[in-house]
Every structure is written in structure tokens, then in C-alpha cells.
Amino acid sequence: MSGRVTIKDVAAQAGVSRQTVTRALNGMDEISETTRAKVLEASERLGYRASRFASNLARSDKSRAIGFVVATFRNPFYTELTADLLGAASTRGWQVTVVSHEQASEAETLANVAREVDAIVGYFSLPDDEILQAARGVPVVLLARTPTVPNLWSVDIDFSAGIADLVGQLRQRGSKRFGMLESQLRGGPYVKSGRRAAYETHVDDRSREAVVICEAEYQSVDAGSAGFRRLMAEHPETDTVLAFSDLMAMGALAAAHEEGMQVPGQVRIVGIDGLSLGAVTYPALSTLAIPGDEIASNVADIIEAVLTGSAPNPPHRLVTPRPLWRGTG
């Protein structure tokens, strides 16, 4: 049989209803041992593997396992967010499995995780309908985007409000001409990030043109260093650099030191993330901090509601990043 075997397939092979298959596989009463054996034999023969989500719906002693899917483990932002999610999950007695889709496609990763957990949270670029298809009924909470179809939930990030606040405070500190280091995955098509869109909304026309797209395997220190040099060569009037991520901002800071530029005397450098690692650079990195604890708390509330059969209110949450002023801003 091609494709994933479903409970409907087992029911058809055993000549029983889907409800009977559920009772048999979960050791429930109200069916005979003969029927139970028939269902188990059909399940074994077809290679059926029940999802944890489906199984837990039928059990009284429910345990929860949550899957957290990230793009890469190379960015410490995901490590810090994982710690926040682990903290929120542990207070509820949940287990968390963390995986990346570096070695497989998003759809394959999502489908594999869906077989092992009760709910999934993560970063995906797949269209909404493809996420639903790959998850096969397991609840999914999207991060940093808001879905456009039912049966998906989300915790999005309000970069527009955050960057408006950041730019406003930078102007009060003396910033006049901004530039941005944008991120692009090497080899893939360029899609303007929400961070760049927000930046362009809140800066002047000349600063809007001062954007360098840094193409790399992932957001890296090296990408930020090369991007900073290019930005300053093409737009030497830039006095404030906003980097797509803290890692890229650290690369920009290193390049500024190598070029003999005073930070923040000649140029201010600000990242976006809020990494604790930024406190040990010199000067310490100013950043637009994404509140991982708020993300984790909202994710846990949504999953709790979905797994207990109630509708999350609201189904889509929004958190706002805030400026964290250290030495470079």
C-alpha cells in the first residue's frame, strides 16, 4: 500500500469501524478479544503507526510530547528560545523534542515529527495548506507568521511596532542616516523579510535605499562582516546599521573594529534577536530583543487549549520586540 497507512485503512482490512480500531489499539473495553486480535493483526500487517495525538485523545492518562522545529541549530537564538519553551513545557509536565530541517525538507521533517508528538511549534516557509497536509491532523503553532487558513495557530512578531520604537529612539540618540544588513539563504530566491519591510516603513528615502542583502548558508558573523564592508563602501554616509540578526551585527562590529571605526562614535550597530551572547562583545551589542519568554508562554497556552479540546482565545498572538540598549547603540 502506497502512502501513509491510516486508521481508515486498518478498519477496512479488519472489517470493523474506525471507532473499534481506536478501542482495540488503545486497550479500551466494549470489544471482544477476537475483534481486538483481528484489528491488531491488520494493523501489524499494514504497518500502521498511530500518532501520539490520536492516541492521547483516547487515553485518560494523557502524557504530552511537543515538537519544536527550527531551521538550523547554528543560530544561538533558537537555543535560547528552546530554553524558554522547555521552561514553559516543564511546568505542565510536557516533553519537548527539538529538530531542524537542515538535512531534510520542511515537509519531510514536519511529517516525521507529527508521528511522534501531540503538537508542533516551529518556523516554516511552506504554504499553509502544505503544512496542514504534512502534519496529518497534529496541531501546529506557527512562529513569526500568521496563517491564512483555519486549523493553524500562531505566535507572530510585530516587527513594525518594534522597529518603529527602535528607530525613534535611535534618532533621539543622534542617528540620521540608517543602513540595513538583510539576510538571504544562499542558493534560494530572495524574499523580502518582514524585518526589512518594517525598516523601510520607518526610515527616510535615502536610508531605505541603503540595504545590503547578505547571502549565506545561514545568518552568520561572516555574512555580517562582509555585508558591513559593502554597506559602508556603497553608502559611506551611514551612521547607524541595523542587522537582520545579532550574529550578523556581531560580524558588522568586528569589521568596524578592523576598519578602525569607533563604535558608537562613528557608527552605531544594532542587531535583532536579544541574544545574551551580545553582552560579551566590545562594546556590548545593542539589539531589538525578541521576547522568547512571551513567545513560549503564548505557545504553551495555545497548545494547552487545543489539546484539551477548547479553542485558543485569541487563536493568533502577537508579541512585540523591544530595544535593549547596551554599548553599540
Image (spheres, rainbow, N blue to C red):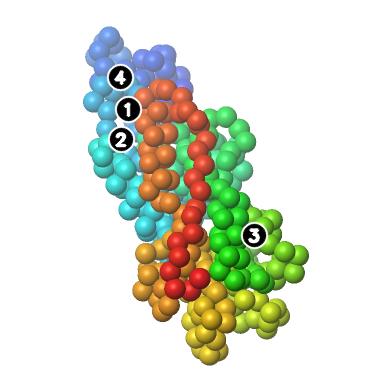
Rounded to the nearest angstrom, the CA distance separating label 1 from label 3 is: 44 Å
Residues tagged 2 and 1 counted as in contact (Cβ below 8 A) = yes
Q: Is residue 221 above or below residue 46?
A: below
What numbered label is drawn on residue 24?
4
Badge nearest the viewer, 3 or 4: 3
Q: Whole-percent x and y of residue 256?
A: 53, 83
Circle 4: residue type: Ala
Rounded to the nearest angstrom, the CA distance separating label 3 from label 2 is: 40 Å
**Residue bearing mark 3:** 199
Badge nearest the viewer, 2 or 1: 2
On screen, residue 243 versus residue 203, left or right, reads left
Name the one closer to the observer, 19 or 146: 146
Badge nearest the viewer, 1 or 4: 1
On screen, residue 210 versus residue 1, left or right, reads right
Residues tagged 4 and 2 counted as in contact (Cβ below 8 A) = no
Query: At 51% across and 66% down in the image, what residue appears?
Result: 271
Rounded to the nearest angstrom, the CA distance separating label 4 from label 2 is: 21 Å
**Residue bearing mark 2:** 64
Circle 2: residue type: Arg
Residues tagged 3 and 2 counted as in contact (Cβ below 8 A) = no
Q: Earlier in the sequence, mark 3 or mark 4?
A: 4
**Residue bearing mark 1:** 56
Q: Earlier in the sequence, mark 2 or mark 1?
A: 1
Q: Earlier in the sequence, mark 1 or mark 4?
A: 4
